[in-house]
């Protein structure tokens, strides 16, 4: 019985939060994975805190803690889900979680989401000239659209990583990928400077054995996190 109340509260909060956000348009993703995960994780934490607090009626305190934790955790997930839809709409695309989308050479921008971050991938061909780290005008415009959105989400933590193909030395591509990531990060530094990483030709999407495949591997990726502790090395 002591555990039943927190579980019931968490399930109820998660159910309520999944129906909070609805916008028209083709670019919206309504799966709300982060909302559900955040609500359940918050409920579990809140229940433990409430149950372990000194005093009488531990079951009641655990239930209250679960409900408050679910609301807090769900709010974080809701914010990230909302950001994914807003970023996709601003960039003129949709939220696409199919991993095969990254292998489509006709997709210059791909917005996806996981349980911990929103992911934006920019193809190199739309971003930079060959061997250059200077953003092309249209690419700069797209990145600025993300920066404008980030001003509404000051808690979001940003990471930027650059990736190249395997032509040239690893060291040369390391410097080039880092410079390209820096060019994007400089625009996105609206709520603090992003964490940048140059990945050279590590973590290739496909084998670097043709011109078409090398073009797929040249890219810049942007990561929007709700929690700095969830950040990982994008090069591996």
Image: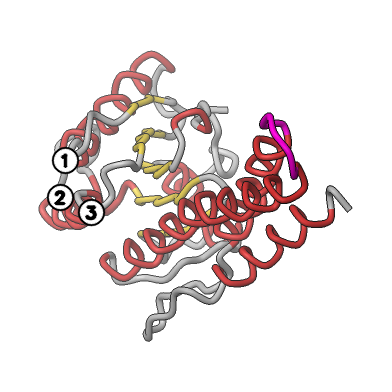
Magenta segment: 52-57
Label 3 or label 2, whichever lies nearer to me, is 3
Q: Position of residue 87 (x, y in %)?
A: 32, 61
Within 10 Å of the Cα at label 1, are there few (<14), some (14-19), or many (20+) other Cα atoms?
A: some
N-terminal of the pair, mark 3 or mark 1, is 3
Q: Which residue is mark 1?
A: 187
Query: Marks 1/2: CA distance?
Result: 8 Å
Q: Picture coordinates of residue 184 (x, y %)?
A: 23, 39
Q: Are marks 1 and 2 in contact (CB under 8 Å)?
A: yes
The structure residue drawn at horizontal position 54% and vertical position 62%, both measured from the top left corner, is 101
- The main secondary structure of the magenta stretch is loop
Q: Is residue 50 above or below residue 127?
A: above
Q: Answer above or below: position of 26 versus 176.
A: below
Q: Position of residue 1 (x, y in %)?
A: 89, 53
User: Residue drawn 26% across and 33% down?
Assistant: 180
Q: CA distance from mark 3 to mark 1?
A: 15 Å
Residue receiving disc 2 = 140
Q: Nearer the viewer, residue 49 or 140?
A: 49
56 is within the stretch colored magenta: yes
In the image, 145: left or right of 33? left
Residue identified by numbered label 3: 152
Q: Label 3: how many residues lie within 10 Å, few (<14), some (14-19) or many (20+)?
A: few
Considering the image in quadrants, where does the C terminus appear?
top right
């Amino acid at each position: 019985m002591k555990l039943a109340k927190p579980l019931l509260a968490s399930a109820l909060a998660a159910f309520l939060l999944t129906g909070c956000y609805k916008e028209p348009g083709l670019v919206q993703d309504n799966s709300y994975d982060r909302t559900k995960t955040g609500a359940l994780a918050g409920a579990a934490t809140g229940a433990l805190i409430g149950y372990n607090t000194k005093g009488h009626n531990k079951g009641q305190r655990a239930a209250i803690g679960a409900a408050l934790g679910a609301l807090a955790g769900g709010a974080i997930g809701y914010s990230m889900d909302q950001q994914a839809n807003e970023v996709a709409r601003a960039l003129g695309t949709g939220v696409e979680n199919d991993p095969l989308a990254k292998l489509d050479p006709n997709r210059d921008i791909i917005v996806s989401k996981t349980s911990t971050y929103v992911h934006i991938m920019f193809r190199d061909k739309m971003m930079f000239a060959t061997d250059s780290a200077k953003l092309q005008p249209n690419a700069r415009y797209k990145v600025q659209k993300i920066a404008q959105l980030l001003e509404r989400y000051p808690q979001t933590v940003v990471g930027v990583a650059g990736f190249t193909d395997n032509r040239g030395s690893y060291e040369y591509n390391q410097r080039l990928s880092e410079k390209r990531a820096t060019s994007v990060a400089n625009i996105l530094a609206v709520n603090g400077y992003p964490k940048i990483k140059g990945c050279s030709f590590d973590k290739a999407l496909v084998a670097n054995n043709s011109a078409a495949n090398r073009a797929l591997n040249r890219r810049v990726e942007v990561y929007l996190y709700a929690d700095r502790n969830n950040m990982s090395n994008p090069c591996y």
